[in-house]
Amino acid sequence: MHPFLILIHLAAAVMLLLWAVRMVRTGVERAWGTGLRSVLRKTGGGVLGMACAGTILAIILQSATAVGILAAGFATSGLISISAGIAALLGADFGSALVVKLLSFDLSELIPILLLTGATLFLKFEHRQVRQIGRVILGVAFILLSLRMVGAATEPLRESAVLPQVAAWLAGDPLTAFVVAALLAWGLHSSVATLLIFANFAASGVLPVEAAAPMVLGANLGGALVAVWLTRDAGLPARRIPLANLMFRGAGSVIALGLLQLVPQPMQHLGLGAGAQLVNFHVLFNFGLLVLSLPLTGLMDRLTARLWPTPEGATANATWRSALDRNAIARPNLALASAQRELLRMGETLEAMLRPVMDVLEVGDEPAIARLRAMDAEINQRHSDIKLFVAELNRGMLSEEEARRGLELAGLANDFEAIGDIIAKTLLSQAADKARLKVRFSDEGWRELSSLHARVMANAQIALNVLVSSDLESARLLVAEKAVLRRLERDFHDRHIARLRSGNLRSIESSDIHMEVVRALKEVNSLLVKVAYPILSERGDLLESRLAKPTLSSV
């Protein structure tokens, strides 16, 4: 086979692996996201409990980075301490290593069964959670299929005359192998995928263990860099969690790299095959790092606070930047594009406000409530800036299409501003009232509110995607969700009334707050759905009225 075709085959296998890992993670988040967040939040401040929670979440999500971002978000809201977040991320790295161990087994015989089951659940069922379970199963099948493709792609490389020279160079220069692997893991944004590729190469004889062992350590460092990169725009002190993890992993990787040069043939004691040795080394490294680093999380918290101090009076939205380009006013297309970018940033801020609502409703943390309320000032300012920008743009010579688009963007800015008010003045106020009155929701009521919130969050993602892509099918899906939320509201209302009739004390005490939260979430969803209206209206897919046409019998 031509070398170029081999590279194409290998690149396709790697991309399928990356997509499959992401597919599993997003499926789990959509199906059980609220429950997983609750696990991390309810664990408390103990570092051992947080490490265990991080391990479990990373196994389920197949991503330590996702746990790190989740922990950083909780730290921003004040729901967990920095040291607890560091412990969770250390545990998540160990959980991610266990995922690599599980996926390294030869499970290729399961691929047809997984494909059949996953596709059936995803395509033949309408229930969202069942479909997401099908998505997860398909993702696992694609991971296994991609690993088989990697093995097939590397088969011709074993006969290559160049490969032994490259392998010998990497084996003789562990520092270069370490750096190359770190850059590869960061570039792929997945340490799980990177390590599975290395293990597959080693098992196939393409990569000698002497070169692969430093590359495992480099991939661990590169994986830690991913979380730092993805939280680079987050405020302090939340960024200190991935930064602390990077410091732990950096120090551990360098020390382990030195020990590899001192201990003769350490890998031969870790398994029979080269691939198994590599994976076991990865698991052992992460377990050792967890055990040694866990008692030092408090010290690392103080060290990162000294290295990256939080400025006095800093808030989550103190440094937001506008995307509006007033220099583009004379060029309407560019000006409207900048207004759309500003509206997207407005939507992302709303999403950041809405996501922790259930957390503060449960905990009632006053500083967290105050921080989220402060974000509404950014929403209001962006709303005002977009309105004035569009008004200034309308004073120029615009085509009919440009004028219509400008009005649509200004209208959506109004809707987004209204969502910010609902969050700040209703949902957060209800959280404060619940804490002040010291009432609790019933278990059934809390599950209903959590599922409703999760659905609205999913629809917020769809709305922002529609705003960017103008995708017709996504717009139709978003509008259909309005009817779903209406049915859910009626259903939850009836269930709540039934609990009141049965004398459920918690439901009686929290009734007003429960109903206000349900109503507010439904209003937020209705405003989000309006993102799809211009797209559907332009194509004639939106009805003028929901009223049915009168029949002869009703006249």
Image (cartoon, grey):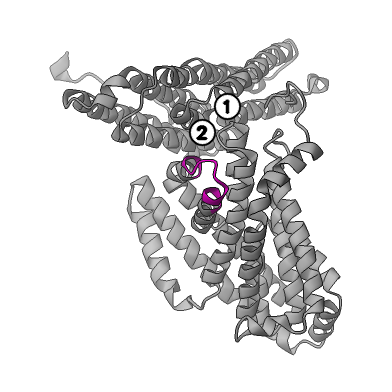
Disc number lying in front (1 or 2): 1
Q: CA distance from mark 1 to mark 2?
A: 9 Å
Q: Could you tell whether 540 is left or right of 70 in the image?
A: left
- Eyeballing the image, is 25 above or below 15? above
Dot 2 falls on a residue whose secondary structure is helix
Q: Nearer the viewer, residue 474 or 207?
A: 207
Q: Nearer the viewer, residue 194 or 19?
A: 194
Q: Position of residue 187 (x, y in %)?
A: 73, 57
Residue type for callout 2? Ala
Location of mark 2 (residue): 460
Q: Could you tell whether 369 is left or right of 267 in the image?
A: left
Q: Nearer the viewer, residue 296 or 374?
A: 296
The magenta segment: 40-51
Residue 317 in view (yes/no): yes
Residue type for callout 1? Leu
Dot 1 falls on a residue whose secondary structure is helix
Instruction: Locate the C terminus by quadrant.
Output: top left
